[in-house]
Image: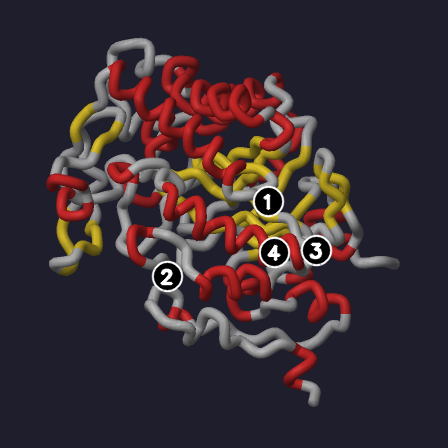
Amino acid sequence: MENELLKPYQLGNLKLKNSLVMAPLTRRRAGAGNAPVEMNAIYYAQRASAGLIIAEASQISPTAAGYMNTPGIYSAEQIAGWKKVTDAVHNKGGHIFLQLWHVGRVSHSLLQPGNILPVSASAISGGDYITTPRGKMPMEIPHALTKEEINLIIEDYRKAAANAMLAGFDGVEIHAANSYLADQFMHTSSNVRTDEYGGSIENRGRFTLEVTDAVSAEIGANRTGIRLSPSNIRYGMDDPDPASLFGYVISELNKRNILFLHLVEPMQPLDNHPHMIREVAKFFRPYFSGTLITAGNYTPESGKAVLEAGHADLVAYGRLFISNPDLPERISKNAPLNPPDTDTFYTQGPEGYIDYPFLKDQNK
């Protein structure tokens, strides 16, 4: 019986050569001006055998950043840098999307232009620490966005999507997961607004859906995906009823006929959060009729099983694609996998980035 992970998949107008997705992975190796460089093009081209690459989260504006040396998609230099990446991937027969990112309160004034405060739905800190040019600092109380500022950020998402098309991407993924800005609007732990962006589930989902509408209107729903993490508790995220919250948001996304929904399984222990959903893709599969991507520490075996069970259409791999640029070939041959070197995940040079061995070289 053929391995479900290795079966081709029709994603909109893209014919994926297999059902493996390279997950978006922050690697902090952007060059000057937060623009991608030649080394980034080599890295992604090495992994072009993935059915689909979702490139690392990229800030939609200078104020959207929360980590040092991460790429953006708002300047001409960044667009040109990403064009090198997309050309390299397409030349290898791959497909690549860009993840659009605004971190919200998961930042620090030392990372912001003019040392302004980070922003969020409400003036509530995430209660953790942020790495800054001066070392680790406590998260600050963010500036609560005004409605005018919300509209400007939605416009930044639209421009970023247009810039991604100029850079040659096949589409974009809206990052609405992992405690970042869209996620902050959705959860009661980070949103205590009393206007149309707070209170009810419909109001708290409004920002995410308006961003989706703006991006879809700019580049087409058939080039738009979104990532959600319904059971995420990092950086102080919590909600008393994630099933109803994300059930509503996903049902609304389904009406918009976007290209895919990308769901993250729980990544932290949920012992103290009994209300959180343990099997995210399985739970929300009935809410979304389009392509569903699942992510969350999958092995080749568990990824194959989730596809066979029908809980998802594609499986995203993160760490295994870092250390195995030829992951589909290794799975097809049941070959040993290179272990990832966590010490080099966020360093600056080629080590642990473009020097992982290919199976063909190991077998010489």
Q: CA distance from mark 3 to mark 2?
A: 24 Å
Query: What residue is disc 3 on?
Result: 93
| Amino acid type for the residue under numbered disc 2 | Arg
Q: Which of marks 2 and 4 precedes in the sequence?
A: 2
Query: What residue is disc 1 on?
Result: 294
Query: What residue is disc 2 on?
Result: 29
Q: Which of marks 2 and 3 precedes in the sequence?
A: 2
Residue 75 appears in view = yes
Residue 273 appears in view = no
Q: Residue at x 53, y 75 (%)?
A: 356
Residue 89 image label: 4
Q: Which of marks 1 and 2 precedes in the sequence?
A: 2
* Label 1: few (<14), some (14–19) or many (≥20) C-alpha neighbours in 10 Å: many
Q: Residue at x 31, y 16 (%)?
A: 198
| Amino acid type for the residue under numbered disc 3 | Gly
| Amino acid type for the residue under numbered disc 1 | Thr
